[in-house]
Every structure is written in structure tokens, then in C-alpha cells.
Amino acid sequence: MFDTLLSLSEQFAGAVKLDAGACLNGKHKDQFCTYCADVCPAEAITLTGDVFSPIEMDEARCVRCGACVPACPAGAFSQPRQEEEQANVFKVLKDFRSVPVELTCPQHPGDDRSRAPVEAVVDVGRCLGSLSLSRLLAWTTSRKADLWLNDELCNGCPIGDMRDWISTEVNAANGFLSAWGRGERIHLVTELGERKERRVPFYDGQQPGFSRREFFSALGRMMFRAVGTMVEEALPVPLPASEGDVPAERMRLRAVVAGMGGPIEDTVDLRGLPFGNVSISDACSACDLCVRICPTDALTSIVDGDWYTLRFLEADCFGCDLCATVCPERAVEVGSVLDTHAFVSDEPKTLVEGTLVPCEGCGAPVLKKEGEKPLCHICKLRRASHFGEVYSMIDELRSLKEGGKPAPEGEESGF
């Protein structure tokens, strides 16, 4: 078992690198994003609960499968050759645009057999759990025929069973495809019932232009990796430049979806994945805490004179709930059902707008609301607590000392 595990991990694209500073768990003590730890089959990732050092990775336990790279919404993990490897796979897939293809991992015996209704099998050279949503969509939309992922090999894999994560990614990809009128075109081999194997050509995804049998007969067991073009070749539209703290994976996804045209459905449910749709209630006071903590600038605000606007760009939202966590007014709600038209728009939608007025207590700008005294959340807390009476007494004494008159009974004074 150990020899098999070592053999598999040695085929993967180098050590996984961790940028702990990018981890969402370092943004707030109550944030507990678990995508990376949940997907890691080797239990090599530990979430510490410490905002100053939120995540640790045991390199000795890491099996280099690369599943954590697409799983992390913040892009905290990277693996140097993943881009090159998956660009090589795309080169192979280009030769089979019109026929269904099965994607498999190095666990496959390579015996030119498949149970799936495909015309070719391609070994992607790594765990299928490392295939990101953007790549699944790019590889599917650049083809005329369906893709099949051989998740049967997860059963008994020495690295670990990745079927749940693979299924989650495939369901999300099919959700996008269906919402954009492309139909569900990515399938899992475990979905098949009883079906006999048949012979189909088997290709090494890292050797574009050769089937495994052709390659071995011509060159023997030569281990090389072709220099692949970057993943942009697989995209229907050019990859845009990174925007602030938005990771490359989300930028790739936005580019792929933009190339799919307009959606035919208004929503897509991406429950279980890092996507969010933010809504704000009338309780918002324009404190801007949500804007300041948003890791991708999906939430932004504009103040033009005394006019305030809170905006939201859905394509950049991780659904991390940080905005809801810090909102003192409990005005923020984050859902997992995306607005497809908003997702493909570069224009943020307005969530809140209104006139700013000084807080009656401290003078900080707050949203004006009819029938309500203008109070920021801190001053509301003060007045709601038993200290409110103490503050009123202090104000009255200060007013008397300065030669003024105390506030009329029953009327609150500022503090």
C-alpha cells in the first residue's frame, strides 16, 4: 500500500505551497472556512482557530493530489506545475472534440478498456479531485460531446476516496451548463448501472499526440512533460487581469462563463461551494463594516456628498459570511442561489442607498430613516443599556455647568 501511495504521489505536480496569509480564517475569529481540510484525503491540513496563524499544513503527510488548490476559495494553495499539466490534457482533448471522452487518474491500469459510453480514455495524470470548476467548464464548452469522469477508482484508492468532492464539482459544473442552456454534459462513471467493458484507445494526458500504446511502442518508458501553453488556450475568451484579492481560479471561471453567452435560467444553486448572493435589509446604518472586511471587494460603497450607495458584485463573492458575521445591525443575509444575470455582469448591483446624516450621539454619518432618530450602532447600544441613564445625567450636568438648561424630562440628549 505504501509503495502504491508513494508511486502515485510522485506522479503529481510537485509540492503544494501554502500562503497562510490568504486564508479566510485569518480575517475574523468567528470565520471557520473548512473547504481545504474537508477535501484533503491525507488529513495533512489543520485549522488552528487562531486568527494569527489560522492554518497549518503537514508537508510530510501531503500526498500532492492538489485537491486543496481548487477547493480553497481564497487561493491560499498552489501547485507549480498544475497549470502546465492541465494545459497538456486540453491539448489531448482537442483531438476528440466530437466524441465522448472519459477522464481518469493514474490509478487506472491503462488496459484500453472502459465501461463508459466513450470513444477514448485520457489519464489526466493526477487525482480527479484537483480538477477545478473553471477547467471542467472550459473543457466541456470547448467540445461537442460529453465528458465522463471515472470516479469508480476512488473506491480503494490509497490516497483516499474523493468521490464526494468530485461529485460536488461535477454537479456545480452541470448547474452552470444547464442554466446557460448547454445541458448536463459531465457524468460520473458510478452513475452507470451494469455495463460491460469494451476496448477504447487509452491516452496519456501529459503526452499530447500519442495514445499510451503508441507512445510506449515508439519511445519506451520515457518520462517527460511537454511544455504546455497556459490555461488561457482553453478559455473561450481571454483571461482578464487579476482584480485586487480575487484569486486566479475565480477569474478563470468568470472568463469561461462569459464565453458561454447569456443564461437562459435566472438562478443556479451552488450549495456546498464558495459562492454567495448578498442581500441587505432596511436595518443597514451604512457603517461600512461589511465593506471593510470583504476579502474580494465584492462589497463596495460610494459616498457622493451626503448620498451613500452600497454595491455588490456577485461574481467575486465567496459566500464566506464575513459580512453577515460583522454586521452589528444583523442586516446582511448571504444565500447560495446565484442570480445568473448578475454573475456575468461587470456592473455591481445596488443593495442600499440613501442620505447620510450625523449620528445624534457621536456625529458619525448614518443613513437617514423616516420616523427614527439618527443613531449609529454604538450609540444605539449605549442608549439601550442601563448606562444610557448615566450618560443622560452626565449631559445634564455638563449643560448646567456651561450655563445651559438641562434637557426636558423625557427627551434624550446626545453623548
Image (cartoon, grey):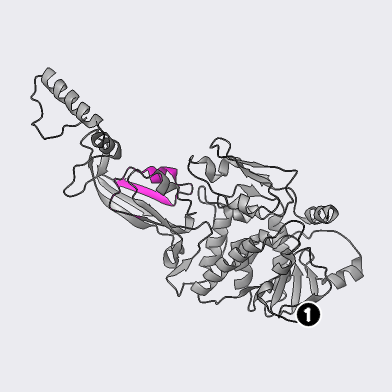
Q: Locate the C terminus by quadrant.
A: top left
**Magenta residues?**
280-303
Element at label 1: loop
Q: Is residue 402 visible?
A: no
* Left or right for 50, reference 330: right
Count of labels shown?
A: 1
Residue wearing tag 1: 197
**Residue 287 occupies which quadrant of the picture?**
top left
State the image coordinates of residue 38 (x, y, percent, origin top left): 61, 53
> Can you say whether 56 is above or below 14 in the image?
above
Q: Which quarter of the picture shows residue 66?
A: bottom right
Across and down, in percent, residue 167 comes to 62, 66
Vertical relation: 143 (above or below) 400: below
Residue 287 versus residue 391 in the image, above or below: below
- The kind of residue tagged 1 is Glu
Q: Is residue 339 left or right of residue 69?
A: left
